[in-house]
Amino acid sequence: MQYLRQRVAALLFTLFVACAITFVVFNVIPGDPALLIMGTEADPEVLDTLRQTLGLDLPLHRQFFRWVKAVTKGDLGTSLRMGQPVAALIKERLPVTLSLAALAMVFTLGFSVIAGAYAASHRGRPIDFLIVIMSQIGLAIPHFWLGILLMLLFSLRWKLLPPGGFVQWHTDPRQAFLSLLLPAVALASHRVASLTRITRAAMLDILSQDYIRASRSRGISHTVVIYQHALKNSLVPIITVAGMQFAGLLAGSVVAEEVFALPGLGRLLLQAIGYRDLPLVQGIALFMAVMVVSVNFITDMLYLLLDPRIRYE
């Protein structure tokens, strides 16, 4: 299938470009990893030996291909600060970030698709204007500020939810869910507002089509027309935006994790930047780029299920 071949080729090329950009960016940043490991008072001969061990004495292109070869084997290097493999640190923190992104995406899809479809089916009525206004407010409120407000209300004042931290799923699933609830709502707020508007616009376009009017003229119920015909044929733009939003959640939960003290990849990235732990920063940045590219690839594959007519020439 040509569509699949083109998507796989685009995926591989994008991954290679992501590797190249990540490597180049972090190799032009001032700083000597050997000095970061041994300290500024280290003996010059010891520093030279360490640079040879790390391969820092090689030409840049040889360092790049050596690094890519290691990456393909799952070796992202070793953290300068913690002395542990970067891949192990990412694996340890990944469940928190994935859980947070998944829960925020569930809220986003659950609220926005229903609200957008309902607004489109009641165009021009008060409920339509109310949903549009609420979506504009949602777009205007920064998610970190909303997160702080939610924490003040639900945690510090009403004592209903934990103010921060995370309990592992295998320890207490209920407490783990409650730990993620407020940050997930905060992260989802902006995305709910955006996807609601996208859903409403896509639904209005479909509802103006001739086959929708023909379905109504045949006596098909309003609910069936809206949720089985119109909404189904509006899913391509909705899934496109939702895929980009989920990729953004995976890579952009840094602030929320810091505000709520969640031990996820975003918080680990901030700590690594603060310590100038370049291998760890580089490994997390590459991993996040791979996740974003992979989510976009999965979104492209979903197009075939939603509309088999979609093909690239």
Image (cartoon, rainbow, N blue to C red):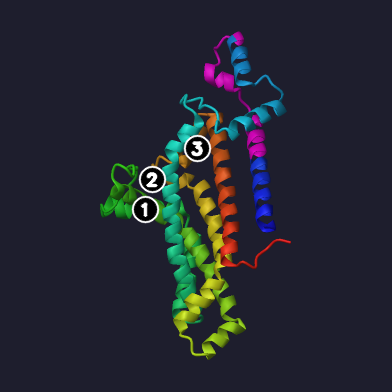
Q: Residue at x 52, y 77 (%)?
A: 229
Mark 2: few/some/many CA within 10 Å (<14, 14-19, 20+): many
Magenta stretch, residue numbers: 19-45
Q: Return the mark for residue 269.
A: 3
Q: Residue at x 59, y 48 (%)?
A: 293
Q: Nearer the viewer, residue 301 or 50?
A: 301
Q: CA distance from mark 3 to mark 1?
A: 21 Å
Tag 3 near tag 1, CB within 8 Å: no
Q: Return the mark for residue 182.
A: 1
Amino acid type, mark 1:
Leu
In the picture, measured across the screen, residue 261 lies left or right of residue 197, that is left
Residue beneath disc 2 = 260
> Nearer the N terminus, badge 2 or badge 1?
1
Mark 1: few/some/many CA within 10 Å (<14, 14-19, 20+): many
* Quarter containing the C terminus: bottom right
What secondary structure is found at the residue carrying circle 3? helix
Amino acid type, mark 3:
Leu
Of circles 2 and 3, the one toward us is: 3
Mark 3: few/some/many CA within 10 Å (<14, 14-19, 20+): many
Q: CA distance from mark 2 to mark 3?
A: 15 Å
Query: Can I make out residue 129 in this image?
Result: no
